[in-house]
Image (cartoon, rainbow, N blue to C red):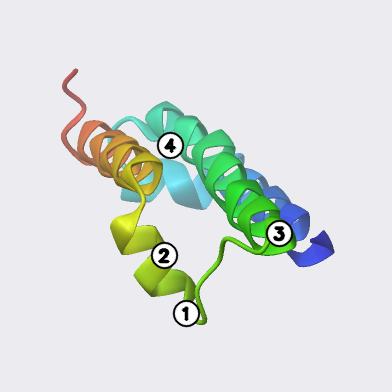
Amino acid sequence: MASTFIAIMVLGLYLNSAVAETHYRFPGALWAVGPALLLWLCRLWLATARGEMDDDPIVYSMRDWVSWIIGACVVAAFVVATTGKF
């Protein structure tokens, strides 16, 4: 679980750097990715603790409708960040 939170922290540090501003037209949209990934990863941990997880988390994620919605939100954030249009 600690690696989950550290990965989100590293993403936030990247988004706060000048490098992100040079790669994206609107890097502020990428701030939505952190909470979305945190929600998704914590949800996977909770499903594992409850015994609902299959052997493969990829298979579980492909069958989970919430994972699809979170994935669509992450893709939308990247589209907005690269194009700069809402």
Residues at discs 3 and 2 in contact (Cβ within 8 Å): no
Mark 3: which amino acid? Thr
* Residue at image coords 64%, 44%: 12
Q: Please state which amino acid type lies under the numbered disc 4.
A: Leu
Disc nearer the start of the sequence (4/1): 4
Badge 2, how many Cα within 10 Å: few under 14, some, many 20+?
some
Residue 56, disc: 1
User: How far is mark 3 from mark 1, CA to CA?
Assistant: 18 Å
Q: Is 59 placed above or below 82 here? A: below
Mark 3 neighbour density, 10 Å: few (under 14) some (14–19) many (20 or more): few
Instruction: Examine the rendered structure and indicate whether residue 37 appears above or below residue 55.
Output: above
- Three-letter amino acid code of the residue under disc 1: Asp
Give the labeled residue for mark 3: 4
Q: Label 4: which residue?
A: 30
Measuring from the top left, give residue 76's x and y in whole percent: 24, 35
User: In terms of secondary structure, where does tag 1 sit?
Assistant: loop
* Residue picked out by circle 2: 60
Residue at 61%, 39% in the rendered image: 16
Tell which circle, 4 or 3, labels the residue nearer the N-terminal end.
Answer: 3
